[in-house]
């Protein structure tokens, strides 16, 4: 809500400075987001008068103008279509700062013709959005008059009115709040009743309960025309363009007093007015020149023929006032805010009136509002007023709150003197009678409970007396992290240590990509963009997109991970925590000391293992040769614990890479943290370490077996021969090729044996070797390689 | 015999002088001291000598043999040293070549780092941790928080709705965790709840997903003074300065009454943001006393129980503390950005060593 200083001063008698007013507004919850000094912005601009218009010799759409600045005639090249001789507009001369561009104007040559200034559009001066032509001032002020004089330049406070403060969408409400702080005196005089001289020929019938009260009046023989200067100045200062007296009066009362009104051209109405629900499909061309298709349940004001106004939102164009209007019907009504909000939202129709109705106007202002508007119409447009018609079951109810004055101390920790509390409440319009507090009719939506009263008082009184409270916790906490949160931290730090960089990507993704990742179809009804419309079923696709983005920026080798949720249903808590990582391109940068190998499945497997170790996964993990469809079917696998998959790893399927348009190999892993059981509580004390003095030794074996045999089987068969003595088994070579029969492979294995208690004799070593060979043969059918 | 020894000495000396390599030297050794070497030959002849002479010559020969052995040893040392020197001369490398590439250390995202920093402070203050789901139902995200369907606040927060459901949304704030916590346990309650939150917004300072941390304290005595003191102390610890000014500006949230926006005193000089009192103000977070209706919705009597709640943007705190300009870049996963603004895995924020201690140089 933009409020000008001059408008504010018409409701508040104050000597306070702009800064003081601005600071006070902010301190009472009416945050001033910006103070705009229009005079400062218009500094240097003057009224210019076009003395001559000629066509530009080198350009069809440009004119060369002779413009008077009051002292001399300047040559100006201008592209606006609306120029004419004698026109007065706002002239910017070289050196002047153009508000809209934030740049100083320079003398220029446009298509070969020198231009010594510029005539400005509304938009260029930040006065509005119109940029279709230059401002046509239609003023009697002479050329050379400072622009600030024409615009009656004012200071504008841009106030962020919170949605609970419907009353502050009127200058009056803001002024009243300010007066409660003592910064000034609230000035407002209630409108007097107006005695009609005849009975309104138009009657009003309420057929829908969303209209609670309607105060209407017929005014005949008015003369519409421009509104008086003071009203125009008010509207301009508040950012509105004056239109005609009848329209300006309703706009004025809307902005000034938060009292939405509507004036029908009575001669365009047929018969009585009916406040009713719209008929399904009924149409109405509104004042914004848009044709609205209405739905049943939307409140309209209709005559005997059809809907003529969307109640509380926007009037109809057909029955609007024009310069020819002679007889009018003035509407001042109270509608259910929920109904107005819903209609406005469905129709996507914004208006000053809707803004106020839906946030709650003073529900007791129908009659006074009508009186005030009638008086202004009579004063400005003349005419004769009918009796007031008031129909409806009535509005303006208020309520009483039983207030315990100790509540302030209870909630805020400090006391405010009783008289001060009463004074603040009264200046805000509350009635205080002992412990009973009556809420003013313009605050009934917002103030209902004791806590609301506390807020009102403290908001105005301020928190300067708020004491410092002791903070020492009653119990000391050691670790507040939940077990799985500790795991997130451990995994993050461990993976970062391995060279992966932590990303945080959206929880949503493109449904067109999600279908490749076992989509669960959890769609967002109103996504921010069409490619962010589904909750991610896996973290892999967002990281693949990130790989692509990075590679497009020239970073070919990408190492990223994310720890975050994936979703498997649209139900709360149907999400699981996943640690997911990707590597793309080369493992090492190109360098003379290392082979420049691409990332491979074993990098991803190592990453997955690292993450699993970081969260203390059990030792008995099994590796399975299966993984989801987005992995390469032959180069991927899983870590499983019984039936639970705890991780997938492998190369990303080439077809998927193609979908993402990634040209380098990519490996990935996903660790399902929730599937890894929390380790059982262990004793803090470690198992005793036994260190042997006996020298360990190694023996090498080479086995030939079918290609499909799992190396893991060979390794575990060997380990199981003697779990005490065999302390390490490693594969140091894998061979498949011409020296072996087809579908065979050879594994070269080094076994480390650590003698226990005494050294082993040659005989004993020989026996162990035979046991190893037999065990491997039994488990896998492998033969010792000749 | 003496003469022969003398001749042999000269002969051997000459051979030794000619031996330029260890191999040649070894040949000399074999030819002299080897089994069929010249010195060994002389020794063998001793047996055929008469006893008197044998004794005398024996001594003489032994001395001679030792003398030759020593000469060979001496020459060997000389040649070994010579060969080593020659090898070292040829073994030069260009020491200016770059070292073997190590896997460069990854980084922790600023949001995670700052979240850990915050949790470490709140742990110190005696808060427990709570959590809630990203997809929320209308009840926990709105209704129980005193935001009925017609409430204007629903328009304040551009909400993402889930398709094909009647009441599921992406949570617009972590405040739903308040409700879940109060449903699950009786006061006293003192929790913080961090997490992802979602709103339909996208510009320099708004992204459709961001992070919030929620605080909730409910008991029979906690008031606004506790809230302000807690926040002031939090700011001091978080921003690592004592010069913290906090302003409570009345505002409006449906779930608190009274409601405040907390602004922190700050300056912006040459683009650098600094927490300090007496300069300007910067909007930090929303807070207030928990609304009586929220307490009622969780089965608590608002005349008996009371407390405060606050909610702040973790990303925003990260931007302010570490001078990161554009919120959108947080979620872009640009490697250059993560490397630059991210934290080393050893930079673990703790109360003992300081929150933003740098755990090593960035490689």
Image (cartoon, coloured by chain):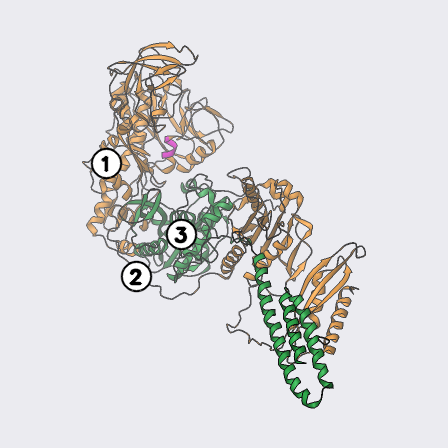
Letter of the green chain: B
Q: Which residues are magenta?
A: A352-356
Q: CA distance from mark 1 to mark 3?
A: 39 Å
Letter of the orange chain: A
Subunit under mark 2: A
| Whether labels 1 and 2 share one chain | yes
By secondary structure, the bulk of the magenta-drawn segment is best described as helix
Q: CA distance from mark 1 to mark 2?
A: 38 Å
Looking at marks 1 and 2 on the same chain, the residue that comes earlier in the sequence is marked by: 1
Q: CA distance from mark 2 to mark 3?
A: 26 Å
Between A744 and B125, which is closer to the camera in this rendering?
Answer: A744
For mark 3, does the 10 Å Cα neighbourhood hold few (<14), some (14 to 19), or many (20 or more) residues? many
Residue A569 in sight in this render: yes
| Whether labels 2 and 3 share one chain | no
Q: Is residue A200 above or below residue A298?
A: above
Q: Secondary structure at mark 3?
A: helix
Instruction: Report x, y in % for residue A391.
Output: 35, 31
Instruction: Report x, y in % for residue A534.
Output: 56, 43
In the rendered image, which residue does mark 3 sit on?
A: B294
């Amino acid at each position: 809500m933009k409020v000008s200083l001059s408008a504010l001063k018409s409701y508040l008698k104050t000597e306070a400075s702009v800064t003081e007013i601005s600071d006070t507004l902010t301190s009472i919850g009416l945050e001033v987001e910006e103070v705009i000094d229009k005079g400062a912005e218009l500094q240097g601009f003057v009224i210019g008068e076009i003395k001559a218009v000629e066509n530009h010799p080198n350009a069809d759409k440009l004119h060369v103008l002779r413009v008077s600045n009051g002292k001399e005639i300047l040559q100006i090249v201008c592209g606006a279509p609306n120029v004419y001789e004698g026109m007065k507009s706002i002239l910017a001369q070289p050196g002047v700062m153009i508000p809209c561009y934030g740049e100083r104007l320079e003398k220029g040559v446009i298509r070969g013709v020198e231009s010594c200034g510029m005539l400005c559009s509304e938009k260029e001066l930040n006065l509005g959005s119109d940029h279709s032509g230059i401002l046509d001032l239609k003023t009697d002020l002479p050329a050379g008059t400072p622009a600030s004089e024409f615009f009656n330049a004012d200071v504008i406070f841009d106030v962020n009115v919170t949605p609970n403060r419907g009353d502050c969408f009127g200058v009056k409400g803001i002024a009243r709040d300010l007066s409660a702080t003592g910064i000034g005196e609230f000035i407002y005089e209630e409108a007097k009743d107006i005695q009609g001289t005849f009975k309104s020929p138009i009657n009003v019938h309420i057929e829908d309960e969303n209209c609670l009260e309607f105060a209407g009046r017929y005014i005949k023989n008015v003369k519409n025309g421009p509104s008086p200067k003071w009203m125009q100045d008010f509207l301009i200062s508040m950012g509105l363009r004056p239109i005609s007296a009848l329209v300006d009066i309703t706009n004025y009362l809307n902005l000034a007093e938060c009292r939405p009104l509507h004036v029908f051209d009575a001669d365009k109405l047929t018969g009585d007015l009916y406040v009713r629900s719209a008929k399904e499909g009924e149409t109405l061309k509104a004042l914004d020149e848009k044709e609205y298709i209405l739905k049943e349940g939307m409140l309209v004001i209709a005559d005997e023929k059809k809907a003529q106004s969307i109640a509380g939102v926007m009037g109809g164009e057909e029955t609007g006032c024009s310069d020819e209007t002679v007889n009018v019907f003035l509407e001042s009504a109270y509608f259910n805010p929920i109904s107005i909000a819903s209609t406005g939202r469905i129709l996507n129709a914004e208006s000053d009136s809707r803004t106020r109705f839906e946030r709650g106007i003073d529900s007791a202002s129908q009659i006074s509002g009508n009186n005030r508007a009638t008086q202004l119409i009579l004063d400005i447009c003349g005419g004769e007023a009918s009796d007031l018609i008031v129909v409806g079951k009535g509005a303006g109810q208020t309520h009483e709150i039983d207030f315990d004055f100790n509540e302030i101390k209870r909630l805020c920790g400090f006391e405010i003197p009783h008289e001060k509390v009463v004074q603040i409440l009264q200046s805000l319009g509350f009635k205080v009678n002992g412990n009973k507090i009556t809420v003013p009719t313009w605050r009934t939506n917002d103030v209902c409970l004791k806590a609301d009263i506390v807020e009102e008082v403290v908001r105005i009184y301020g928190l300067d007396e708020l004491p410092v409270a002791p903070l020492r916790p009653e119990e000391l906490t050691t670790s507040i992290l939940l077990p799985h949160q500790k795991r997130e931290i451990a995994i993050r730090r461990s993976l970062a240590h391995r060279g992966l960089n932590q990303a945080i990507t959206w929880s949503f993704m493109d449904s067109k990509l999600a279908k490749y990742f076992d989509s669960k179809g959890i769609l967002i009804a109103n996504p921010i963009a069409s490619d962010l419309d589904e909750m991610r079923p896996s973290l892999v696709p967002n990281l693949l997109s990130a790989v692509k983005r990075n590679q497009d920026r020239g970073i070919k080798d990408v190492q990223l991970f994310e720890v975050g949720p994936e979703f498997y249903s649209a139900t709360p808590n149907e999400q699981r925590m996943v640690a997911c990582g990707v590597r793309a391109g080369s493992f090492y940068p190109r360098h003379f000391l290392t082979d420049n190998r691409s990332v491979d499945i074993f990098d991803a497997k190592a990453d997955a293992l690292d993450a699993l170790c970081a969260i203390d996964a059990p030792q008995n993990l099994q590796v399975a040769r299966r993984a989801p469809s987005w992995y390469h079917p032959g180069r991927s696998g899983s870590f499983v614990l019984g039936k639970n998959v705890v991780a997938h790893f492998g190369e990303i399927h080439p077809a998927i890479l193609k979908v993402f348009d990634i040209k380098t190999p990519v490996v990935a892993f996903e660790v399902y943290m929730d599937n890894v059981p929390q380790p059982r509580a262990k004793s803090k004390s470690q198992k005793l370490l036994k260190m042997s003095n006996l020298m360990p030794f190694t023996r090498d074996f080479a086995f030939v077996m079918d290609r499909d045999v799992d190396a893991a089987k060979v390794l575990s068969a060997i380990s199981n021969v003697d779990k005490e003595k065999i302390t390490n088994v490693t594969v140091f070579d894998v061979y498949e090729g011409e020296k072996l029969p087809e579908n065979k492979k050879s594994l070269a294995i080094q076994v480390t044996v650590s003698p226990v208690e005494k050294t082993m004799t040659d005989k004993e070593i020989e026996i162990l070797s035979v046991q190893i060979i037999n065990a491997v043969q039994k488990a896998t059918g492998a033969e010792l390689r000749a | 015999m003496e003469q022969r020894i003398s001749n042999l000495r000269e002969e051997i000396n000459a051979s030794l002088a000619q031996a330029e390599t260890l191999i040649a030297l070894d040949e000399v050794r074999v030819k002299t001291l080897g089994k069929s070497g010249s010195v060994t030959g002389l020794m063998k002849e001793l047996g055929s000598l008469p006893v008197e002479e044998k004794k005398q010559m024996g001594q003489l020969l032994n001395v001679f043999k030792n003398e030759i052995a020593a000469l060979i040893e001496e020459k060997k040392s000389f040649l070994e040293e010579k060969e080593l020197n020659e090898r070292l001369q040829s073994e030069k490398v260009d020491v200016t070549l770059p070292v073997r590439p190590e896997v460069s250390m990854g980084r922790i995202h600023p949001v995670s780092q700052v979240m850990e920093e915050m949790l470490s402070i709140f742990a110190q203050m005696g808060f427990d941790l709570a959590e809630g789901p990203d997809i929320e139902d209308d009840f926990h995200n709105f209704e129980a928080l005193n935001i009925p369907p017609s409430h204007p606040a629903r328009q304040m927060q551009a909400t993402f709705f889930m398709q094909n459901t009647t009441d599921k949304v992406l949570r617009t704030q972590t405040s739903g965790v308040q409700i879940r916590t109060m449903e699950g346990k009786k006061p006293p309650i003192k929790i913080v709840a961090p997490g992802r939150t979602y709103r339909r917004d996208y510009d320099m300072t708004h992204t459709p997903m961001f992070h919030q941390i929620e605080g909730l304290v409910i008991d029979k005595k906690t008031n606004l003074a506790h809230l302000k003191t807690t926040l002031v102390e939090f700011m001091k610890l978080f921003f690592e300065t004592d010069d913290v000014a906090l302003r409570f500006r009345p505002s409006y949230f449906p779930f608190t009454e009274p409601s405040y926006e907390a602004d922190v005193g700050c300056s912006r000089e040459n683009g650098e943001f600094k927490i300090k009192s007496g300069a300007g103000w910067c909007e930090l977070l929303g807070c207030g006393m928990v609304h009586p209706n929220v307490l009622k919705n969780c089965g608590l009597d608002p005349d008996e129980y009371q407390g405060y709640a606050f909610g702040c943007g973790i990303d925003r705190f990260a931007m302010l503390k570490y001078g990161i300009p554009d919120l959108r870049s947080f979620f872009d996963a640009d490697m250059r950005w993560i490397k630059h603004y991210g934290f080393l895995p050893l930079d673990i924020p703790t109360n003992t060593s300081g929150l933003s201690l740098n755990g090593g140089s960035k490689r």
